[in-house]
Image (cartoon, coloured by chain):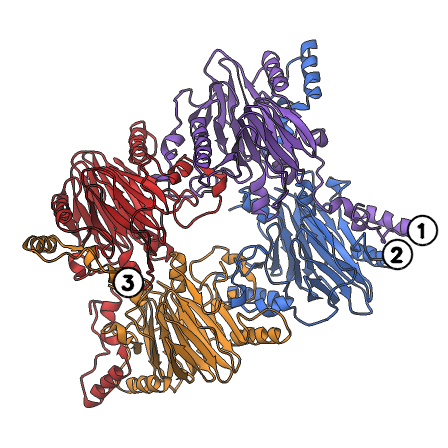
Chain colours: A orange, B blue, C purple, D red
């Protein structure tokens, strides 16, 4: 074991001891002392590994899938799961999170279903698809974050003659590991093919600090179906301008960031997934940081790098990477550098497991 | 007493009884049985009365005050308190709330101070004044709600050559009655005479559902210093459009409404004062309603009436009225009818006293 | 005004100014600048005064009332309200709180009623009365705290041939001032004349840290109808023993104290009233302290004194005193000194007004 | 897949398709459509299986381990993990929970350590061991529940000449799966060999509804180190008596139950583990029930059976069984039947995944 001491509880094997261990096996028992080091490490040591996926590769494979694989009932989605090499043979990007590239061809429909798993979509490029969530059609455009919380019916349709690709994030690994999943099919088509600019959820809820009197009950999930790029961009721009003017606004010097939140509580958008957007000024380098829980980034714009466990990875638009629990990481911005982030931090915080270690802090 | 029974505890007066009552007085004692009916009414029976103030009169008096009364240290504000006739000689609009018309002449400054009392301003007409809250200059324009929560320094200055008038709402009566007030003078001038279109608080916080990572601590008061008319109007417009399209959005048929909220919690903007804005379609009449606690309305636009305790009062732009606890009321809209509302409902809800009775519900 | 400056807003009287002030009066308006100092003091300056009531006097008057005043419908209770001299002619011990001595003769019944006001009883001496709360008979004995939260039916009956006297605490002044009161008569007798040692509420809830599965819904009020002296005494005894053994347990050196709490939330027993019990070792003197809100103490046992606003008052068993908001106070114990305390602190904390200043801290 | 439909997204294999799948593999990508049925089941289908362990067997193996295996640094504990046959080769009783029999010989000490994982002990028989939690010695006796929440130092020592055996419950599988574990060695001995009847935590906190003024900060974990059998037994006894008397008290007819709770919040004792105790009258049979999440029972006294997924298992004192997520179960009592229960329900509730289905409800 790696606890820095010898294990005094492993005596020499004798016939009696052998009989004891056979007794254990027969009775479905395993002694703690033979495996403590793995069960209770000094600090989190994930089987998941830090990994970077290049958008150029992902996108090409998605396009190719569009040519070869029909979308429809049973498989449900033309989604390519980013499979952490440390978690093979599962298609898990981390022990808790699922991340995938989803692709929809011209005029295609991904049929409706619902599941206990929480999901979101983020659009790094393209437009023309509407996702229909509990009957409310939501436009998908570059920079938008779309929510489909647990047990909400949802399907997608492409209203154009070009393809579209985006990323999906879900808590599938957590749900599967903890046996919480339910699934139900809905309509084979989407229930509403309208293509409004703004969903009904947005029209009710996207007015800063204003709450409809028809919506005074707090909800576990955010009632905002789409967080538009226009607002995110403006918020980040203002933070950097305020920093320029000498006022506190950014999270660190040169580092603007927002967390997407549930307006009924001020908390995270869904109970298991946190979503954020980060913007670094050119030249900014964030302090090395370790956190409990896993997180995924996608580069939205600009150029830079991430240092993951001491190794530097250059990053371009669309590139995605995963940081497992307690792996040290730092971001470096060559140009202005925009990144979308999601993580399992709400799980860690709600269950009292969150810890953070920032170098030099 | 009004409890519908006789009080069996009031025996005929005898010398012994007289001596007992004298003993009470000497020892600072008052028997419950002589006054129960007043102390414990069958339902709330406020000393405050329903009352309507006409904007035309208020405004004229405010203008006249501007001519005759200087603004400055000691008196602090050129504010005219709406004094509920039932609460004389106090300048209280209700047992918990203060409402006043405040007036600032061309180029005048109302000096900075702070107090434990929570305050807001609402602008029914005019512009040109900036309120400076903890050093952050906030523009005041028609339709805006401005917050100055407890113990925030604030002063006002008029950057124009015309006068400006707005309303103030505070919890002064509650604070005075319950002995919670603290007060401190600040600068005799405002600390920043800049006149930006948007305050720093708005630039950080007025992006729907987006929370700055530099502001993850929940706060008792909303960090939004100004709720702009543009957003309020849009939110109400969308509710009525959604209703037209057949979707749930309004609080009642023909009645759109928003509550101003604290984005860090989803709750009220301040711990003692609730602020809302209501829009009725022409022809809408709300059901007769009784609520625990007191509320004040100001007509923002349109024409209509309020029925207060059975009496109908015609209302024009700027008119204000108060509804004491448990007084039945209903609104009637002749044209599209816009009203700003504030109340002490957060007190009632946090202390478990809220009750509502809606006719026909 | 007492703000330490002159009020520059009080110009010399002119005919025009006089006309303006007449206009104010006609329109139910009062200018802020004429009364700011009273409305917004530098710190809380209560009309209520610190005051001590001697138990010997209170008790004698209660006994005498028992001889002369019948108890029954209409007056409802033979209760003597402690009337703060600064709040005459009201029978309020403070701006928020009501405190009274209640007396019940042999075999008497105080009839059932309910009200929105929250109430408790505390027993400084005697026994033999049961209070019946929503049909559950609760024994009253020396040292017990009994709750009758808002809108719970309750009556009392004396099952013995001797008289009994106890204190009542309610939020009557707060309720009356803020117009939140409702009242309803119940049975003219109590609904259950059984005299069990323990109420059903205690039998379900008085097991430390154990929650019945039939009671998993959180409640605004504590479900514990009686907090028994036996437990309070043991808790305080243990705190002092732990202090003797060198462990942290007391709130200050020589000062043990418990707060009565709602086991469903860990919070106060009722939304407006905090109840505590304090025990000082002989010789202990607490630091001078100021708090927002008002509080009442009753001496339960031992001898000592309270310093109220600089004046020392000797105290004997049963004596009661009130400390208005922001008045400095300190307790001094000659012998071991036991005191019951109640206050309006939950109001102050829930509404964000609490402040405390401890000398030397 | 088992979704009741065919998967239209699995076209015939072509060279092009083969190349696509090779591309996926090279880029660490796995398509969703090849595995949706496993990832997103119609309802939870745990790999864990229902299983019963007989106490007679467990106890004999524990005794034998005591003879052959020393206890000490490295292995840390002589603990036998109950390994769910469906989760081999892991020693997990469920996907989230760890359950073990721990054994300590005469005069032995299990050294101190701490870990992020939350732990408790429950004593089905015996006495004589003290567990020392953050320096506070806690007696272990039959029927007691002992807490050692995350990151609290703890060790055990046997103060007698006889052996002792108890059960441990932890969130080790959850912690390992989600990479949240930290571990640190403490003293090789326990830091305090005193053997008091009651721990300091109990002396401060085990007074029903009373909170020390020195402990007003809410804590994530219960401050009560030991929930004594005496209180649990009395609470259950009272519930059945109240039921006999015709009052609501039990959770179902003939079924008394308590939840161990954190007195600072009223919530669960630790953020990931719920602990309860159930008592069934002879002849009682609980309705068939399915719940999200996994749970473990140990028979404390009496005889009865559990129906797990349609199969009936006879149960004797000390027997343990696990119920994986969504497996239907019912308890049957031959005699009065006492059972200790723990589960991962706080995880399910805090993350919004809890669902319950009760037959006939």
Query: Element at badge 2?
Result: helix
Image quadrant containing the C terminus of chain C: top right
Rounded to the nearest angstrom, the CA distance separating label 3 from label 1 is 91 Å
Residue D114 figure quarter: bottom left
- The residue beneath circle 1 is C14
Tag of residue D224: none
Secondary-structure class at tag 1: loop
Label 1 marks a residue whose chain is C
- Percent x, y of residue B156: 75, 62
Left or right of C160 on screen, residue A57: left
Q: Is residue A360 left or right of residue B328?
A: left
Disc 2 marks which residue?
B68
Q: Chain of mark 2?
A: B
On the image, the x and y values in percent for residue D122 come to: 26, 43
Q: Residue at x 71, y 40 (%)?
A: C45
Query: In front: mark 3 or mark 1?
Result: 3
Q: Residues within 10 Å of mark 3 (few under 14, many from 20)?
A: few
Q: Nearer the viewer, residue A75 or C164?
A: C164
Q: Is A183 placed above or below B323 here?
A: below
In the picture, measured across the screen, residue D110 lies left or right of residue B73, that is left
B167 up-or-down from C167: above or below: below
As drawn, the residue found furthest toward the bottom would be: D15
Answer few, some or many: residues within 10 Å of disc 1's Cα (few below 14, many 20 plus, some between 14 and 19). Answer: few
Residue at screen point 28% across, 62% down? A4
Look at the image and tell me whether residue B41 can be seen: no
- In the rendered image, which residue does mark 3 sit on? A4
Whole-number angstrom distance, CA of label 3 to CA of label 2? 84 Å
Quadrant for the N terminus of chain C in the image: top right
Q: Secondary structure at mark 3?
A: loop
């Amino acid at each position: 074991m790696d606890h820095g001491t010898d294990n005094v509880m492993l005596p020499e094997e004798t016939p009696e001891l052998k009989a004891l261990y056979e007794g254990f096996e027969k009775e479905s028992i395993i002694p703690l002392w033979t495996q403590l080091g793995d069960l209770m490490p000094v600090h989190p040591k994930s089987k998941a590994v830090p990994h970077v996926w290049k958008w150029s590769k992902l996108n090409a494979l998605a396009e190719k899938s569009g040519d070869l694989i029909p979308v429809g009932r049973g498989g449900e989605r033309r989604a390519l799961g980013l499979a952490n090499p440390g978690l093979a043979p599962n298609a898990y990007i981390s022990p808790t999170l699922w991340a995938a590239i989803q692709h929809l061809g011209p005029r295609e429909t991904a049929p409706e279903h619902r599941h206990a798993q929480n999901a979101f979509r983020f659009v790094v490029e393209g437009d023309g698809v509407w996702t229909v969530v509990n009957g409310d059609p939501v436009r998908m455009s570059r920079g938008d974050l779309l929510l489909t919380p647990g047990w909400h019916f949802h399907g997608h349709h492409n209203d154009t003659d070009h393809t579209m690709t985006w990323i999906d994030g879900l808590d599938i690994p957590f749900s599967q590991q903890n046996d919480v999943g339910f699934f139900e099919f809905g309509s084979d088509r989407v229930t509403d093919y309208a293509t409004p600019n703004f969903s009904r959820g947005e029209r009710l809820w996207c007015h800063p600090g204003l709450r409809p009197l028809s919506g005074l009950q707090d909800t576990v999930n955010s009632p905002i179906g789409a967080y538009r790029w226009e607002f995110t961009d403006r918020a980040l721009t203002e933070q950097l301008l305020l920093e320029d003017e000498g006022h506190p606004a950014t999270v660190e010097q040169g580092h603007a960031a927002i967390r997407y939140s549930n307006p009924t509580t001020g908390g995270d958008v869904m109970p298991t997934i946190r979503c954020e957007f980060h913007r670094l000024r050119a030249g900014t380098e964030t302090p090395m940081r370790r956190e409990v829980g896993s997180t995924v980034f996608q580069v939205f714009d600009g150029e830079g790098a991430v240092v993951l466990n001491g190794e530097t990875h250059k990053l371009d638009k669309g590139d995605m990477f995963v940081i497992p629990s307690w792996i040290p990481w730092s971001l470096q911005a060559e140009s202005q550098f925009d990144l979308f982030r999601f993580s399992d931090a709400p799980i860690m915080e709600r269950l009292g497991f969150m810890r953070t270690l920032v170098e030099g802090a």
